[in-house]
């Protein structure tokens, strides 16, 4: 079978080696006579999978001992509520930087829980840039500063994270976690849905500094408390066992690629191939994001007309390219070049872009 050139924005491409490993172990994991999906989450076999996934993440991201690593459910969307429930205590303000649709959704949920404010926003420019750190309004009353590190719809990414004295920086890294090196100590909390860079959908990774979850209000429901999951090694209820198994396999693959630094170098190379085709097209392809805010993960662009956009996407589909349609809210084209998208797919897209332009 010939594999598609998968540029889906999420769920997205997984490494072929990881899929083949899962295929080989699907009905008999670790000589148990059972699939991972059939194992008890209290069994020794699954405990090994669970703890291995956690340790690999600690190793690859350099997570310090004073942070909890949690495997939760509900995606980043549930975190939009859990964060203010647990951390937005009385008298404090949740500070949000708006850089796209997901940060809008985050503050919408925050407003239901407590007082919020917008520290900075690029909405007026159709979210085509990331605000500068010095332009973010903060105060000592901020419970946290929330950012979305990469914006899948608009193709923008924080190239330099803000360092805010006295404010706990919280980052939704759903679409760029493990795509480059980050200093975890600069964040109070990092969270991410797994379905773009870490594995299949169904697992949400939360990395949170321990002191932040020591004073959760008593009225927060048990399942929505970070301390509930921290105290039970993310096993308070049945976790998404197969998703965590796949996450562990993806992390092993990242390690084999040279870890986060190796993946980052490859991601830069992949993105540059496509951005070069855009920049050298004499305006035939136009990128949405301002150059210093461009994403390594989601490359958004338009052709000179909607008719050409449609023709480009139709022919690309015939050539085996999948997922190049822009988000329904903005249109155009989008190539999501997550960790597992191979270099060859980006080269093939570049070649098709040049060929299509040449025929016009």
Image (cartoon, rainbow, N blue to C red):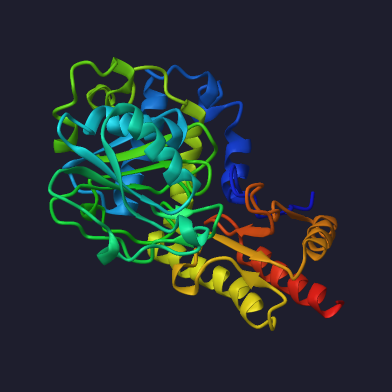
Which image quarter: residue 347? bottom right
86 or 196, which is in the foreground? Answer: 86
Q: Residue 306, percent across and down?
A: 78, 61
Q: Residue 316, percent across and down?
A: 80, 60
219 or 42, which is in the foreground? Answer: 219
Q: Image point 41% across, 42% down: which residue?
A: 192
Whether residue 209 appears in this view of the structure is: no
Q: Image point 30% across, 34% down: which residue?
A: 83
326 or 202, which is in the foreground? Answer: 326
Residue furthest front in the image = 124
Which quadrant: the C terminus? bottom right
Give the answer, above or below, for where 232 lies relative to 197. above
Is 226 displayed left or right of 10 in the figure? left
Is 90 displayed left or right of 280 in the figure? left
Q: Image point 62% across, 44% down: which residue?
A: 20
Which image quarter: residue 91? top left
Q: Residue 93, percent across and down?
A: 22, 39
Please tell me how many numbered marks the rendered image carries. Answer: 0
């Amino acid at each position: 079978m010939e594999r598609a050139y998968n540029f889906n924005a999420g769920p997205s491409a997984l490494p072929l080696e990881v899929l083949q490993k899962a295929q080989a172990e699907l009905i008999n994991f670790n000589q148990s006579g059972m699939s991972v999906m059939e194992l008890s989450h209290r069994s020794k076999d699954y405990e090994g999978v669970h703890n291995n996934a956690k340790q690999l993440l600690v190793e690859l991201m350099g997570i310090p001992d004073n942070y909890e690593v949690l495997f939760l459910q509900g995606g980043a969307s549930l975190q939009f509520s859990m964060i203010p429930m647990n951390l937005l205590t009385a008298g404090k303000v949740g500070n949000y930087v708006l850089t796209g649709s997901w940060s809008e959704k985050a503050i919408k949920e925050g407003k239901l829980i407590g007082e919020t404010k917008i520290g900075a926003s690029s909405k007026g420019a159709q979210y085509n840039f990331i605000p500068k750190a010095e332009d973010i309004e903060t105060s000592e009353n901020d419970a946290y500063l929330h950012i979305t590190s990469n914006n899948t719809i608009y193709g923008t990414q924080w190239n330099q994270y803000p360092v805010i004295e006295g404010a706990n920086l919280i980052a939704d890294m759903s679409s760029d976690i493990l795509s480059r090196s980050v200093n975890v100590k600069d964040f109070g909390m990092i969270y991410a849905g797994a379905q773009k860079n870490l594995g299949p959908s169904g697992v949400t990774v939360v990395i949170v500094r321990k002191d932040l979850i020591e004073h959760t209000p008593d009225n927060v429901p048990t399942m929505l408390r970070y301390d509930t999951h921290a105290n039970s090694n993310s096993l308070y209820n049945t976790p998404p066992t197969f998703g965590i198994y796949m996450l562990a396999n993806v992390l092993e693959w990242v390690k084999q690629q040279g870890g986060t630094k190796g993946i980052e170098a490859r991601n830069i190379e992949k993105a540059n191939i496509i951005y070069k085709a855009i920049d050298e097209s004499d305006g035939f392809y136009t990128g949405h994001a301002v150059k210093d805010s461009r994403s390594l993960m989601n490359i958004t662009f338009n052709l000179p007309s909607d008719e050409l956009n449609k023709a480009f996407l139709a022919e690309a589909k015939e050539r085996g390219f999948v997922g190049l349609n822009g988000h329904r809210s903005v249109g155009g084209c989008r190539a999501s070049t997550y960790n597992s998208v191979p270099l060859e797919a980006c080269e093939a897209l570049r070649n098709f872009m040049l060929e299509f332009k040449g025929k016009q």
